[in-house]
Image (tube, helix red, strand yellow):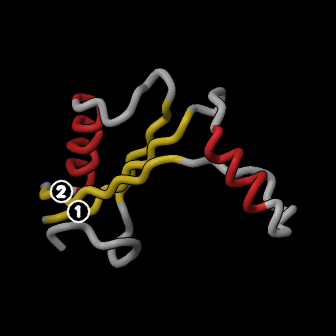
Amino acid sequence: MSYAVEVVVMNKRSARDPEGETIHRHLVLRKGYGQVKGVRVGKYLLFRVDAGSPREALSIVRELVEKLRIYNPVVHDVEVRLRAEGSGPQVPGD
């Protein structure tokens, strides 16, 4: 079976996010959205994985992310999750 697995890479909370700060200050606040208190910028990756179960698909992507250094664990946090079918962008191979 084929599964869509999402990976979100963000700067750690302790690290500054200059891009997010710029978007917040120069776009969001200047356009009158004062109720928005902060913006964080990251990377979103979407994988299509053939696996025997959702758990196996997640395991494959977690291993890939670690071994191929998709992120820097010193400065980034990473979240790997199964995407709900039918939601979000298409994955190549869909």
Mark 2 lies on a secondary structure that is strand
- The image position of residue 55, as x and y in percent, is 26, 50
Q: Is residue 16 above or below residue 89?
A: above
Q: Which quadrant holds residue 67?
A: top left
- Residue displayed at 22% across by 38% down: 64
Determine whether, in the image, residue 28 is placed left or right of residue 2.
right
- The image position of residue 51, as x and y in percent, is 14, 55
Q: Is residue 6 above or below residue 9?
A: below
- The image position of residue 66, as x and y in percent, is 29, 30
Q: Is residue 2 above or below residue 15?
A: below
For label 2, the crowd category at 10 Å Cα-Cα, with few meaning under 14, some 14 to 19 and many 20 or more, is some
**Amino acid type, label 1:** Tyr
Determine whether, in the image, residue 12 is placed left or right of residue 72.
right
Quadrant in the picture for the C terminus = bottom left
- Residue displayed at 68% across by 54% down: 23
Which dot marks residue 48? none
Q: Earlier in the sequence, mark 2 or mark 1?
A: 1
Q: Is residue 89 above or below residue 69?
A: below
**Amino acid type, label 2:** Val
Q: Are marks 2 and 1 in contact (CB under 8 Å)?
A: yes
- The image position of residue 76, as x and y in percent, is 49, 32
For label 1, the crowd category at 10 Å Cα-Cα, with few meaning under 14, some 14 to 19 and many 20 or more, is many
Determine whether, in the image, residue 51 is placed left or right of residue 58.
left
Query: Which residue in the protein does label 1 denote?
Result: 3
Quadrant in the picture for the N terminus = bottom left
- Residue displayed at 28% across by 48% down: 58
Front residue (pair 64, 82): 64
Q: CA distance from mark 2 to mark 1?
A: 5 Å
The residue positioned farthest toward the bottom in the image shown:
86
Query: Which residue in the protein does label 2 denote?
Result: 49
Mark 1 lies on a secondary structure that is strand
Q: Which quadrant holds residue 82?
A: bottom left
